[in-house]
Image (spheres, grey):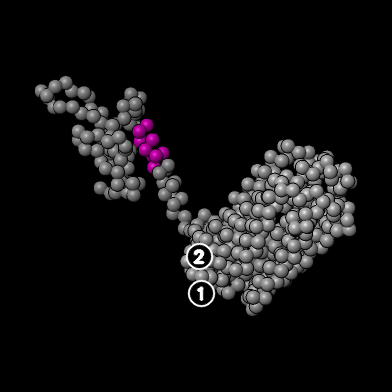
Amino acid sequence: MSSGPLSLLPHCQRGAPLVFPVWRGIGASGGVGGGWSEGWGRCLRWETAGPGEGPRIPVFDYPVWLVLCRGGRARLREVCQRGRGAIRLPTDMLSIKLPQLFDIHQVPKVFQEDSIISGYRHPRSSALDCVLSSFQMNNETINIWTHFLPTWYFLWHFSVLCSNMNFLTDSYTWPLLVYMLLICIYPFTSSCAHTFSTMSPESRHICYFFDYGALSLYSLGCAISYGYYVMPDCLVNSWLHRHFVLIAVGNTLFCTSLSCYSRFLEVQFPQRSKALRTGAFVLPFIFDTVPLFYRILLCCGGNCSPSEALSSHCYHLLFAFLTCFLFTAHLPERLAPGRFDYFGHSHQLFHISAVVGTHFQMQGVLADMASRKAWLVDHGAVPSLLGTIGALVVSLVLNLGIIGIFSAPLLWKSCHSSNQPHTSPCERKEQ
Ligand SMILES: [Zn+2]
């Protein structure tokens, strides 16, 4: 008798009935309902002693409730057929082939990461492979999830704020609106970039262009919220305060341009590329944090007493420095190349540190916003539509333009190379 994958369940023994039915495999035949029926019958059968050994209880070869129905055997057969379909579904799902993984020497240089030796996805993965790969353990999986899950965390905070604040008409909340939008967008964009970065070398560059663009817009969100809520008393209405958002818009253009440009140097001059990219993000960070440094270090005005806001801001600064260190140092994988390919490499820690830092930053901004409202409104520091949502829209359009300029030659190159006879993703993989 043939035996299927689920036939490992023990068969009922006479006098020792089983509770569970026996599945003898999809191809099993014979008896009522093929591979099912005997199992059901045996499992639901009970017997007593033979003639002369006491009262005898009727023996049922199939479930009692089916015998009681008219056409019970036919129904049993139908149930068995349905059962087979239900059983076959998960086995088919399990047979989905997950994408193959590669070592560092098997992928082009543009995909190689410092001190990460294994767990690389195919450099010409299809979009479906990329999505599936987020559920398969590879060297990008944790990078994807460490920014995808926080997106939902910040979205949840945003939805709570939406129900408690009037973002539509209360202009005092607009800097917070811009900030919350951007802290939801930057981890989501990063998660998408890490997911789809292995479709081709060109797509890898374009994915990270968007990642850098989102990060640079996040720096604008910080500047807008700091400019309106965190700015120390003695700098309110100063030249810096009046031009703070405008300079931050300029910073986003500088940051996106330089970080996108740095990708073109990555293969030939990796050190220079890293230095340029780090500089591109450090500059807007330092500029955005000037009001905070001023408040903490110089104890400007009446804002030097310890408060909930200041302690949150200090935690944020701590994690911001840690984030920068992890980004540049490539620790711990540099100490033991290959040991941290899947878990614990610097980029994963960098993501986590950035998200925790953003959490404290959000707490600090919310605390300052609530505690300083009366003073700020009294001193005329009321946010304008142009200085908040207008700055975001202008910056978004200009940054998308920069990303378009850097992406155009890559897209042209990609289209040009795909003018060769068309190949399916599977065929491309064979190349
Ligand atoms: Zn990342």
State which tag comes first along the sequence, 1 or 2.
1
Q: Which residues are magenta?
A: 75-84
Judging by the rendered image, the residue that carries numbered circle 1 is 105
Give the main secondary structure, helix, strand or loop, of the magenta stretch. helix
| Residue farthest left in this picture | 52
Residue 78 shown in magenta: yes
Q: Which residue is drawn at the image coordinates 55% and 57% (left, top)?
A: 142
Q: Which residue is drawn at the image coordinates 29% and 49% (left, top)?
A: 3
Judging by the rendered image, the residue that carries numbered circle 2 is 341
| Residue farthest bottom in this picture | 268
Q: Amino acid at mark 1?
A: His
Q: Report if residue 54 is visible in the image.
A: yes
Question: Which residue is nearer to you in this view: 254 or 1?
Answer: 254
Q: Position of residue 96 (x, y in %)?
A: 47, 55
Q: Quadrant of residue 251?
A: bottom right
Question: Which residue is nearer to you in this view: 204 or 335?
Answer: 335
Graded by Cα atoms within 10 Å as few (under 14), some (14 to 19) or many (20 or more), the crowding at tag 1 reads few
Q: Report if residue 362 is visible in the image.
A: no
Q: Position of residue 365 (x, y in %)?
A: 73, 48
Front position among marks 1 and 2: 2
User: Would you say 285 lies left or right of 108 here?
Assistant: right
| Secondary structure beneath label 2 | loop
Q: Amino acid at mark 2?
A: Asp
Q: Position of residue 55 (x, y in %)?
A: 16, 21
